[in-house]
Amino acid sequence: MSDVRFFVLGSLAALFLTYSTESSAQTSSGFVCPKSGRIVERGDNRYIVRSRCGEPDSKSTRYAARTIRIGNIAQTITVEIEEWFYDFGRQRFTRTLYFENGELFAVETGGYGIKD
C-alpha cells in the first residue's frame, strides 16, 4: 500500500511543479468579450471581433513566411499577422488576439489588466 501512496504523492508533486512553472500566458481558440457578452473564436474576421469587443488597446502587424506543400511542390508565401491587445480592466485578464490574413487564429490570455 505504501508504494501506491508514494506513486500518487509523487505524481501529484510532478503535476504541481509542471503547472507552477508554466508561463502565465495560455493560448485558446476563443473567449467571451466582456463588452458585448458575445463569443469570438478561431475563424472570426477582424470586423466580427471589433464589433463584439470594440477597438483594441493596441495593434501591431508583422509578416511571416509560410511554406505550402501541394504534392511534391513546395511554395513559400508571406502572410500578414496582426496582434490585437485588449486590457479589460483590473478584474479581468488581458487578451492578445492573433489574426493571420484577417482571420483570428489564436487567443492568448495574459495576467490581470491595469485599466480602471
Image (cartoon, grey):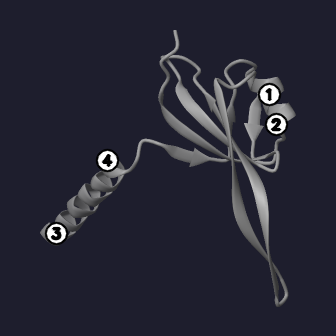
Disc 1: which residue: 50
Spatial CA distance of label 4 from label 1 is 34 Å
Q: Which mark is residue 113?
A: none
- Amino acid type at circle 2 is Arg
Mark 1: secondary structure: helix
Horizontal relation, residue 85 to residue 35: left or right: left
The numbered mark, 3 or 1, whose residue comes first in the sequence reads 3
Amino acid type, label 4: Ser
Q: In x, y percent, where is residue 30? A: 68, 41
Q: How many residues crowd mark 3 within 10 Å: few (<14), some (14–19), many (20+)?
A: few
Res. 11 image quadrant: bottom left
Does residue 104 lie above or below 36 as drawn? Answer: below
Q: Nearer the viewer, mark 4 or mark 3?
A: 4
Residue sitting at the far top: 116
Q: Secondary structure at mark 4?
A: helix
Which residue lies under the disc numbered 4? 20
For residue 1, which numbered disc appears in the image? Answer: 3
Identify which residue, 31 or 6, lies in the foreground: 31
Q: Secondary structure at mark 3?
A: loop
For the residue carrying disc 4, how many other residues have a C-alpha within 10 Å: few (<14), some (14-19), or many (20+)? few
- Residue 57 position, x and y percent, is 64, 23
Judging by the rendered image, the residue that carries numbered circle 2 is 46
